[in-house]
Amino acid sequence: MKLFQSPTAEIPGLDQPESSKTMTEQISSQRVAGPKDITEIPSTLGYISFGSLLMPTIEGVTVRGEVSDSTGQVVSVSFEHDGSSLQVSAFAASKSEEMWPDVSTQIKASIETSGGSVVEGNGGFGRQLDVRVATPDGQKEMRFIGVDGPRWFLRGVISGAALTNQTAAQNMEDIFRSLVVDRGNVPLPPREALPLKLPDGTFAPPKFDI
């Protein structure tokens, strides 16, 4: 079952050659369907706030926050639906440089150095990494995705049924697209985690630092 119907619309300027666009225009054109910046939505009514990250209310999706044992801070938010999970982390970024190309390269190198395997692919958000790593509980498979926005970067980690089921994968991507980032105006260095918090009633189990 699909959670969303993908909207279609003619967006002026999308047929403009990439070389003639500024970096900001290129980043914006790559995520026209989302995730959105808070300045790109008319109202936050109907959204659940996790601080720098907002999500619309979606029936059938369980949401939980992961908390760092060492700092007690919320480090990511996970969305679970029908055997699939999407873990999302938000970071500050510069105005003129995309983070995902560099971050994905570093993730790939780190996993391969530690003995894991990485298969690069092209998905709904461009470059994605299908990863397999050894854990004390056996092999674990994940898919890393990323999106650059205006002065922010979102990293998603997909696991579960979405790795092998196309409909489930589309649902996880649609949840990722539905998110809104409230970067704020406080100066932050690139790659610093954006502050997250838990709304009332959200379960937050401890999570070891990675």
Image (spheres, rainbow, N blue to C red):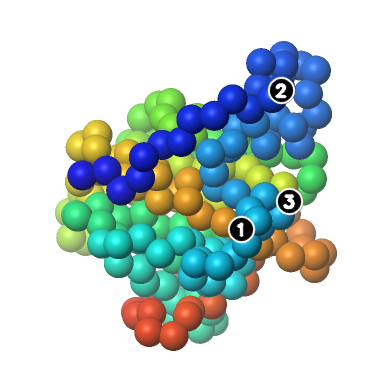
Quick one: quadrant of the N terminus? top left
Marks 1, 2: nearer the viewer = 2
Crowding at mark 1 (Cα within 10 Å: few <14, some 14-19, many 20+): many
Q: Which mark is residue 151?
A: 3
Q: Amino acid at mark 1?
A: Val
Residue designated by label 2: 13
What element does badge 2 sit on? loop
At x 36%, y 60%, the residue is 58
Instruction: Find the distance from the CA under tag 1 to the CA under tag 3.
Output: 10 Å
Report if the CB atoms under discs 2 and 3 are less than 8 Å apart: no
- Where is 206 relative to 37, above or below? below
Q: Is residue 109 left or right of residue 43?
A: left
Q: Which mark is residue 181?
A: 1
Q: Which mark is residue 49?
A: none
Can residue 147 be seen? yes
The percent coordinates of residue 64 (x first, y second) are 37, 71
Marks 2, 3: nearer the viewer = 2
The percent coordinates of residue 32 (x first, y second) are 59, 36
- The mark that comes first in sequence, 1 or 3, is 3
| Closer-to-camera residue (68/160) | 160
Q: Amino acid at mark 3?
A: Arg
The percent coordinates of residue 126 (x first, y second) are 50, 30
| Closer-to-camera residue (199/188) | 199
Q: Is residue 110 left or right of residue 149?
A: left
Instruction: Find the distance from the CA under tag 1 to the CA under tag 2.
Output: 23 Å
What element does badge 1 sit on? strand
Q: Amino acid at mark 2?
A: Gly
Quick one: quadrant of the C terminus? bottom left
Which quadrant of the structure image shows residue 103? top right
